Amino acid sequence: MKFLKKLITSTWFQHSIFWILSIYTIGSYFSIASLFKVIDFFYALLFHVSLVFLVYVNLRLLIPRLLEHEKYVYYILCIPALIVATYCIHELTFEVLFPLMDSDYYMVSFTEWQVLVSIFGIYLVLTTLIKLSKSWYKLQEVEKEKLSIELDSLKTQINPHFLFNSLNSIYSQALGKSEQTAETVLELSNLLRYMLYEVSEDKVPLVKEVEMLENYIELQKLRLDENSRVEFLVTGNLSEVKIAPLLLFPLVENAFKHGLKGVSEAGYVSIRLSVEDRVIFAIRNNLGQIDDMEKGKYGGIGLENVKRRLELIYPEAYELTIERSESEFLVKLILE
């Protein structure tokens, strides 16, 4: 299968098929009899001496050096010169080259110049369109690959600060010989496994994304005092819905990062997820203080990450609202 695909996509194979079809078409067009005979094949071969010159000067010289560099005026000016040169080669082939050959056939160029120019024009347009379409296809493949790489990169831009905090919390539990230590390690393990191994698909079940968020929230609760309030309410049927992996996570991470810290009164994070005809995800949190580490290298990734992924994955199919007051931060995401 791989060999067949490689064969079909190879340049020499595609060009061979093109010229075989071309020889048959030209031979049939100029054939006197109803059936394609040897003399028709021989005539078509001679006819293609000039066509080969026309096509490859266009493909190898004019298109890459002029058309692909947007030198359209120069390209258009070169076309008449190329057609004249091709016409001269055609005449020389039948008037000079063929008489020098030892052949049982007698051939002359009986085609009117208007017909020849039309044929040359058709081959110019046809080969130019094929070349440009292949270039466009390759460009699309490159853009698709770049998009895939960018999306993979965005998936991995998860703030490691929560991991450090989780490990510190587990360390504190271990020192205190807490019975919750094993459960906390399992929650962290499930979260990391999801991030590392289960987000390779373009879309994942929303149920799995919610489970991952619940694990993250439970890990964050280890660092909170008794006065802090965290709510996560889910409504609607999640079973049939899929979503881009780790799309919601930076929003939740951002809420914990910017809220619940450095406040004299009780902090809070309120998360609402509803699924009806649309997916509506809203987070409201108080504004706290950001520590030095989160101000540095890892700060500011969350929301920009989400915005960029929304533009790439859900173009014109989402609404993202961000509101900030002196004491509160609200993010609302709607996916069609």
Image: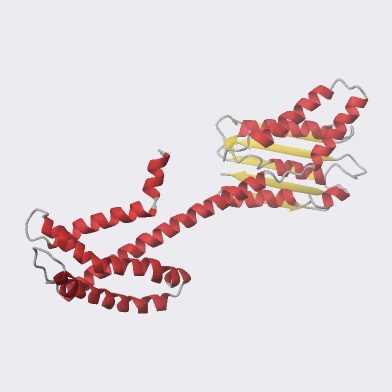
Which quadrant would the C terminus be assigned to in this image? top right
Going by the image, does 263 lie left or right of 127? right
Please identify the residue farthest to the top as the structure is shown: 179
User: Relative to 84, is 131 above or below?
Assistant: above
Going by the image, does 76 lie left or right of 318? left
Give the number of marks. 0
* Residue at 84% across, 22% down: 180
Which quadrant would the N terminus be assigned to in this image? top left
Going by the image, does 169 lie left or right of 72? right
Q: Position of residue 72 (x, y in %)?
A: 42, 75
The image quarter in which residue 60 lies: bottom left
Q: Position of residue 37 (x, y in %)?
A: 11, 55
The front one of 125 and 249 is 125
Q: Is residue 319 visible?
A: no
User: Relative to 152, is 168 above or below?
Assistant: above
The front one of 305 and 287 is 305
Q: Is residue 4 visible?
A: yes
Q: Position of residue 275 (x, y in %)?
A: 60, 36
The image quarter in which residue 185 lies: top right
Q: Position of residue 104 (x, y in %)?
A: 8, 63
* Residue at 44% across, 58% down: 136
